[in-house]
Structures are given as C-alpha cells and as structure tokens.
Image: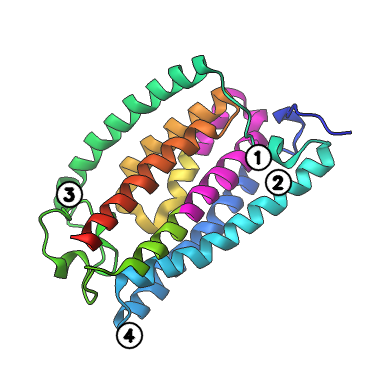
Amino acid sequence: MQTNTFEWQKTPQLSIFQFLLATFIPSGIGLIGFHFVLPAMVKNGTPVLIAWPAIASVMLFGFVVVAIYMLRREAKTMGISLWTRMCLKPLSLKEWGIYLGIAVVGLAAISGIQTLIPGMLKAIGYTIPAYMPFFLNPAIDATTASMDVVSPGLPLQGAYPVLLLFVVALLLNILTEELYFRAWMLPKLSHYGNRSWVINGLLFALYHVFQLWLFPVLLVSSLLFAFIFYRTKSIWLPMTAHLIGNFLLSILGILFLIAS
C-alpha cells in the first residue's frame, strides 16, 4: 500500500565516498563532453551554438534516465509513489512567500558576484576556452558584442532550430539537477543532519568542474537551493527558480538574438 509521506531518513543513506562517486562520475562525463568532444566538433566546423546544446542534451538525457530509474526503484521499495519520492511535495502560500523571498535575495547576490568574475579571471590570468558558448563567458555582453563573438560560424538571425536545441538542453539540465542532485541525493545524506545541505551544495558546485571559472556563482546558488530544498522538503521552489533563471531568461535572450 502506497503512502504520500516520504521520510528522508528511511531511504538508503550515502557515505561521503559514495556521494563523491555519485557526483564526480557525471562530472567526469561532463568534462569529457565539454572539454574534449566539444572542441573537436568546433575544430571540425560545427558551430559552437549547435555543438554545445547537442552534446549537453545527449549527456543530460542519460543523467535524467538514471535519476528517474533510481527514484522509481526507491519509491517502489519504500511503498511510496514516484511523485512523492521525487520530492514534489506541495508548498503552502506561506512557504512560497518565505523561501521565494530568500531565493530573490540570493539571486541578487549571485548577480553581483557574477559581475566580479571577469576581473577575478584577469587577475589570475585565466582565459575561458574559446570553444565555450557566449552565455558561459561573463566577459561577453551579448547585447553589445559582435555576432562573430556571440555566434562564430553561425548567423543567428532566423535560426529558430537553434532555439529548439537550447530548449531541449536547458529542460534536461533542470531535470538533471533537480531530480538527480537534489531529489535523489540530498535525502540520502540525512544522517549528516544540518550539514547535509552544505555537503550537497558544496559538491554540487564542484560537479561543475568543467565550468570551474563560474565556481563562485555556482557555489552560492548551489548552497542557496540546497538550503531551500532541505527546509521545504520539496523541489518545487528550486525548480521554479531554475526554470525562470536558467531557462526562460536564457531562451528569451537567444530568441532576441535570433529574431533581431
């Protein structure tokens, strides 16, 4: 008989070693995809704004399939619905108000930190690889940069299929991060008590080793959403913020470039 209550402590817990494996195996796959396959494709003439979402979609689709499989298996073992094990618990209006406010303050801080990254990279002499897309390079302002910088080798005007590629990649990214790294992982660290969300947030930021130049931003955002998820026991708010910040704004930005 199924129940709608998910008690985090009853799911099989992860040791730090197991959590490291669960974090850095997908991180290693991302490193290979974005720092070996991506530059090879770009070198062979594939525009970066086609190569990047194509590679991302293939990898992220695999991560989502793995996440749903593991969540479904645990849900069956625990006698709860898949929806419940996905941590899709409804939030009250009060919870939405409190934690949305925290998210807004955190996102404002993240925006401020992001403006400091170009100066930090210049100070340490680090150059972001040229094969990375413009939206992963804080030094590029897409509203003022030339199209050769924003989309080398691919005129964006009217290129609507590119938009579809990014819609797929960004949706898969949201599902991977919320279902795998938060809904599946964080409850399995319950035996670490109040430290669990800190461990989850720190290692989730380190998962992005293939975008290490964004670490200050990723660390703050990872801790922010791990904390909100830990407190609410629901991925609805992190998923909503993720959808607005990483999806809608990105898609609207790319749509502007294509339509202009």
Tell me: 146 left or right of 173: left
Q: Earlier in the sequence, mark 1 or mark 2?
A: 2
Q: Earlier in the sequence, mark 4 or mark 2?
A: 4
Q: Amino acid at mark 3?
A: Pro
State the mark number for residue 118: 3
Q: CA distance from mark 1 to mark 2?
A: 7 Å
Quadrant where the N terminus lies?
A: top right
Q: Amino acid at mark 2?
A: Leu
Q: Earlier in the sequence, mark 3 or mark 1?
A: 1
Q: Is residue 98 magenta?
A: no
Q: Earlier in the sequence, mark 4 or mark 3?
A: 4
Which residue matches tag 1? 86
Q: Nearer the viewer, residue 14 or 250?
A: 250
Which residue matches tag 2? 71
State the mark number for residue 44: 4
In front: label 4 or label 3: 4
Q: Which residue is at 32% across, 85% downward?
A: 44
Q: Amino acid at mark 1?
A: Met
Q: Is residue 129 visible?
A: yes
**Highlighted range, magenta:** 171-200
Residue 87 % position (x, y): 64, 34
Q: Which residue is at 25% across, 68% downward?
A: 158
Tell me: 113 left or right of 211: left
